[in-house]
Image (cartoon, rainbow, N blue to C red):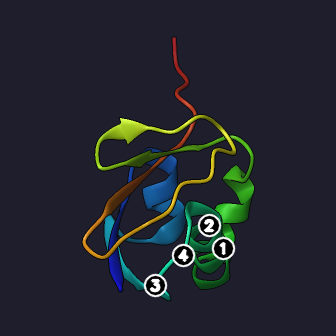
Amino acid sequence: MDVRVLFFARSRELAGTSEASVTLEPGSTTTVLLQQLLQKYPQLQELQGSFVFSLNQEYLAPGEEQPLKGGDEVAVIPPISGG
């Protein structure tokens, strides 16, 4: 199954792209997706533990694991900073 991943701000800079399609096994979860993203884009490890996922435009709690299905849209939201 394919999941659309959107990268924003620092995650976009580190991944070198604003979006990607990731193919996962049926029944995969956001944890599996995170593992795949860190393998494909090892630079994202800089943000590990500080970003959150949004699944189909709904924020997930940090560390929350959710099942994924084909066509889902997952956004990688880095911490917001500034003043």
Of 66 and 57, nearer the camera is 66
Label 3: element kind: loop
Q: Position of residue 34 (x, y in %)?
A: 62, 67
Label 4: element kind: loop
* Type of amino acid under label 4: Ser
Q: Which residue is mark 4?
A: 28
- Could you tell me how far apart the alpha carbons at marks 1 and 3 are, in whole angstroms? 19 Å
- Could you tell me how far apart the alpha carbons at marks 1 and 4 are, in whole angstroms? 15 Å
Judge from the rendering whether residue 46 lies leftward or rightward of residue 15; answer left or right.
right
Q: Position of residue 29 (x, y in %)?
A: 56, 67
N-term mark: 4 or 2: 4
> Is 48 above or below relative to 15?
above
Label 2: element kind: helix
Q: Which residue is mark 2?
A: 34
In contact (CB < 8 Å): disc 4 and disc 2: no
Which is closer to the viewer, label 2 or label 3? 3
* Type of amino acid under label 1: Leu
> Is 6 above or below relative to 60?
below
- Within 10 Å of disc 2 (Cα), the crowding (few <14, some 14-19, many 20+) is some
Q: Position of residue 48 (x, y in %)?
A: 72, 53
Point out which mark residue 26 bears: 3
Q: Which residue is mark 1?
A: 38
* Rendered residue at 25%/71% (across/down): 71
In contact (CB < 8 Å): disc 2 and disc 1: yes
* Type of amino acid under label 3: Pro
* Type of amino acid under label 2: Leu
In contact (CB < 8 Å): disc 3 and disc 4: yes
* Rendered residue at 68%/51% (across/down): 47
Of 11 and 53, nearer the camera is 53
- Within 10 Å of disc 4 (Cα), the crowding (few <14, some 14-19, many 20+) is some
N-term mark: 1 or 3: 3
